[in-house]
Image (cartoon, grey):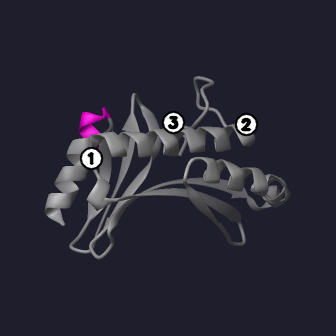
Amino acid sequence: MKDLVNRVEAIFGELGFKVYDVESDEEIYEASFSRDNHFYGYLFIEKDNNFLELGYSYSFDIRDEELLRKNIEEIMNICYKYGSYFNVVKDEDEISLSVFSKIYYSGLNVESLEDTLDDFISCNEEISAVFDLHDENGDEGLSSEEI
């Protein structure tokens, strides 16, 4: 797994991304990734999986449930457009919407990861626009300080 982690970190670096907040053991590797001080998501590597997974989560107050329900079809269409998928988890205080993308290790190279990241970031920018989420500069998306 160590060789795979080194390969993934090297490709992220070649694409200009910073990988940080790493947590790992023999079974799983998790890290955040950003570029130009913009947080873009998390990456996950699990020992027994055949793919690298990218993730990004949005949190909503439980009172925003109707807003999320109203926009769920648009979120599905956006995710489909970019080859991503999502899940929604609700607890007593908040609702979490997580968006994911995968890339199989067998096809992992600079170009394929660049394409996957471009689609993943575009997907999340469109979802952010649905909810009118902006960072401190007025740009769509969220900075790491806001997460």
Residue 22 seen in the figure:
no
* On screen, residue 27 above or below 83: below
Q: Quadrant of residue 19?
A: top left
> In the structure shown, which secondary structural element does the residue marked by tag 1 occupy?
loop
| Nearest to N terminus: mark 3 or mark 1 | 1
Which picture quadrant has residue 45?
Answer: bottom left
What range of the chain is rendered magenta?
Answer: 12-16
For disc 2, the marked residue is: 132
Query: Residue 61, image x and y in percent?
Result: 73, 57
Q: Position of residue 110 (x, y in %)?
A: 28, 41
Q: Nearer the viewer, mark 2 or mark 1?
A: 1
Mark 2 in CB contact with mark 3 (< 8 angstroms): no
Mark 1 Cα-neighbour bin, 10 Å: few <14, some 14–19, many ≥20: few
Q: Residue at x 17, y 53 (%)?
A: 6
Q: Position of residue 139 (x, y in %)?
A: 60, 26
Instruction: Name which residue type carries label 2.
Output: Asp
Q: In this view of the protein, which residue sits in the foreground, 126 or 142?
A: 126
Are there few (<14), some (14-19), or many (20+) residues within 10 Å of tag 3? some
Magenta span: chief secondary structure: helix
Amino acid on which disc 3 is placed: Ser
Q: Amino acid at mark 1?
A: Asn
| Residue that sits furthest to the top in the current view | 137
Location of mark 1 (residue): 109
What residue did someone put label 3 on?
143
Tell me the CA gap for discs 2 and 1.
Answer: 34 Å
Tell me what residue is drawn at x 19 percent, y 51 percent. Answer: 7
Residue drawn 20% across the image and 44% down it: 10
